[in-house]
Image: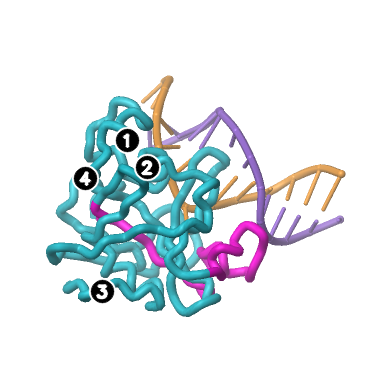
Chain colours: A cyan, B orange, C purple
Amino acid sequence: MAQPATIDLSLNAAVLAPALIGAVLRVGPCSGRIVEVEAYTEEDPASHSFRGRTPRNEPLFGPQGRFYVYRSYGVHWCANIVTGPPGSGQAILLRALEPLEGINMMIARRGGVPVHRLCSGPGNLARALGIDGAMNRSEALIEMPEATRRVIATRRVGISKAADLAWRFIDPESPALSRRP
DNA sequence: AGACGGATTGCCT
DNA sequence: GGCAATCCGTCTA
């Protein structure tokens, strides 16, 4: 699957998500190559925006390119990038990165885990990058992929509704995936 | 006002 | 592979 020349945040989440594989996410001094994402839309029963706007999910209906950060299981933070037409309630969940810069800082935040596990899984990714509720609605910095990566689509992880949609996109060769294909 | 359950992770068996 | 940890938006009464 080929990547586009620019990242168009107004694209629907399920269209843009595979194009983000190989792009670089930057948070302060830390960065990593995106290798696993999932798409969520307002028509999608598994999406936080499915039942309309609420105080928690309001960022999903705000400007594109911002973070929607939420607490999962009362323990972990998960980071999405808002996308799609304005107010459309779409987002892309960041699930895994290959660490590039600021690795020492990530290790300090995560403890002694192998580098390829630092940002493997949405909760781990947020912890390694220092993403928490304070970054909700802040602008997400994404840089274009330099090289084309292989991208495959799979079922999303950990959801019960619309579980057969193949809206999880991965670089199958990455060692940083939260789960193998 | 009270109950339910989840886009998870890590430790225990 | 099983399960506890731990918070809050949403649903029900």
Q: Nearer the viewer, residue C13 or A27?
A: A27
Query: Where is mark 3, residue-wise?
Result: A6
Q: Are marks 1 and 2 in contact (CB under 8 Å)?
A: yes
Query: Where is mark 1, residue-wise?
Result: A106
Tags 1 and 3 both on a single chain: yes
Please give left or right for residue A171 compared with residue A161 in the image: left
Label 1 resides on the chain identified as A
For the record, the magenta segment spans: A33-62
Residue that lies at the very extreme toward the front in this rendered image: A29
Q: Is residue A31 magenta?
A: no
Q: Earlier in the sequence, mark 1 or mark 2?
A: 1
Q: Is residue A59 magenta?
A: yes
Q: Earlier in the sequence, mark 1 or mark 3?
A: 3
The amino acid on which the numbered mark 1 sits, given as a three-letter code, is Met
Q: What residue is shown at x 36% (from left), y 67% (from top)? A: A167
- Which numbered tag is attached to residue A64? none
Q: Image quadrant for the C terminus of chain A? A: bottom left
Query: Where is mark 2, residue-wise?
Result: A129
Regarding mark 2 in the picture, which secondary structure is present there? Answer: helix
Tags 2 and 3 both on a single chain: yes
Regarding mark 1 in the picture, which secondary structure is present there? Answer: helix
Q: What residue is shown at x 52% (from left), y 65% (from top)? A: A47
The amino acid on which the numbered mark 4 sits, given as a three-letter code, is Leu
Q: Percent from the top left, x then y, of residue A116?
A: 22, 40
Q: Answer above or below: position of A23 versus A42.
A: above
Crowd band around label 2 with a 10 angstrom C-alpha radius: few (<14), some (14–19), many (20+) = many
Q: Earlier in the sequence, mark 2 or mark 3?
A: 3
Indicate the quadrant where residue C10 lies: bottom right
Q: What is the distance, in whole Å, between disc 4 and disc 2 at their CAs? A: 12 Å
How many numbered marks have been drawn onto this rendered protein structure? 4
Q: What residue is shown at x 28% (from left), y 47% (from top)? A: A31
